[in-house]
Image (cartoon, rainbow, N blue to C red):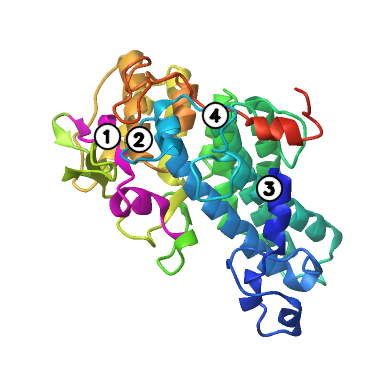
Amino acid sequence: MTPRSRAIRAMTRTAVCALLAASAACGTLLEVDVPSRVPADGSVVPANAAILMNSVVGEFECAFGGAVVGGGTLGDELANSSTGNTTWQVDRRDIATSSTISTGGCGGLGPFGALNVTLWLSGELQKGLESWTDAQVTNRRQLLATNAAYAGYALLLMGEQMCTATVSAGPELSKAQVWTRAEERFTAAIADAQASNATDILPMAYLGRARARLNLARLPEAAADARQVPANYVRNATFSAADPRRFNPVFNNNNQGAGLTVGPVYRAMTFEGVRDPRVPVTNANRTGANNADSLYLQGKYTSFAASIPIAKWAEAQLIIAEAELAAGNVAAAVAIINTLHARTTPALPPFASTSAADVRAQLIYERRAELFLESQHLGDYQRLTLPFVPATGAPFPFGGGFYGTNRCFPLPDLERTTNPNLAGR
């Protein structure tokens, strides 16, 4: 089944009935299922605009959680401690194109299907919001801004995590093409947020566009956007202990299920001999679910309901620091690093160097620590050509085989055979 077909099925699910219970519309729906999903027939109407927006956000948050875990496993933030072949392939970095890892919905390790569901839902809402009037929909411009911002982030993650991608059964796109689409959605979100005074969405859109431009190697423009993000800003993906589909996936897979362990690089991160409080990890002194690999537990997310940042001020500062360093302003980059160090609890020692190479290495460290398990590292793994840990060719400790060279999820064969734009390619 193609991502577009899954999206249509998702739209026909009727969890939104609970949200519509106060109206007669609920009488036409089927049994309540997943709260973030909406029915297709007759639901894309002005009266349901806010509910449809909640559906887009809900689908994105579920897909985002999967991207945090899947990207963390393909990168080196997380490692296998399960008996499942799917997890082995991702952690081992040898994902076969014949695998269905990326074709499922949210909750799996592959990003492709889940992000495409979000984008399809967002596209349906976008068409409605553009055709409806302000008189028909309260806060229509704010909804346009929010919808565009979440679509932008779905595209951003698609570009970072997939080697190539398609959107809604369209043509095959390069990473740069996907990020360019993301930039366009963020630009639209900025305009609508400014017009509607959507002060919570505006920084999210600016930072999303900064991240897209960083990926596109347009550092001055990225820094200009990042400077629009106010101090202490954060936009979170929310999770819940009430519904397994909405469990925080890091806590669920690591702390609860023990199918993933924290990767070796992150088990004892220190700066100047001081343990970095941004990467709280403890040795569980036992093995994971496979009774073989040592289990290390992250302490950043401490419950099923813990939120995960989508966009935050510290990320904006790191983008600015990277741009300053590229422009030769070494001292400005060092100052940003030390601002971030002063904000930790307890505060980390200050960093001092006039060497551009040393500052670059420290910025890589800062991104690892500050953005730990926030969906960022797999993009850095590629953009900064970080070394493979464990090295390529090293024996995979459980399940056999050897570590490979995947830095991104390949477009699955299933998409090539079912997408009419790709058939035979």
Q: Who's the residue at 56% across and 28% down the image?
A: 215
Q: Secondary structure at mark 1?
A: helix
Residue type, numbered disc 1 = Tyr
- Mark 3 and mark 2 lie on one chain; the one further toward the N terminus is 2
CA gap, disc 4 and disc 1:
24 Å
Answer whether residue 248 is magenta in the image: yes
- Mark 2 and mark 4 lie on one chain; the one further toward the N terminus is 2
Question: Quadrant of the image for the C terminus?
Answer: top right
Mark 3 crowdedness (10 Å alpha carbons): few <14, some 14-19, many ≥20: many
Q: Secondary structure at mark 2?
A: loop
Q: Position of residue 50 (x, y in %)?
A: 68, 68
- Mark 3 and mark 1 lie on one chain; the one further toward the N terminus is 3
Q: Mark 1 and mark 4 in contact (Cβ < 8 Å)?
A: no
Residue type, numbered disc 4 = Leu
Q: Judge by depth and name the residue closer to the eye, 260 or 306.
A: 260
CA gap, disc 1 and disc 2:
7 Å
Question: Quadrant of the image for the N terminus?
Answer: top right
Answer whether residue 270 is magenta in the image: yes
Q: Can you identify the residue that label 1 sits on? A: 266
Q: Please name which of the two marks, 2 or 4, marks the residue nearer to the observer.
A: 2
Task: Determine if residue 377 is in view.
Answer: no
Q: Can you identify the residue that label 4 sits on? A: 214
Q: Who's the residue at 86% across and 59% down the image?
A: 131
Residue type, numbered disc 3 = Leu
Q: Which mark is residue 404?
A: none
Q: Secondary structure at mark 4?
A: helix
Mark 1 crowdedness (10 Å alpha carbons): few <14, some 14-19, many ≥20: many
Q: Mark 2 and mark 1 in contact (Cβ < 8 Å)?
A: yes
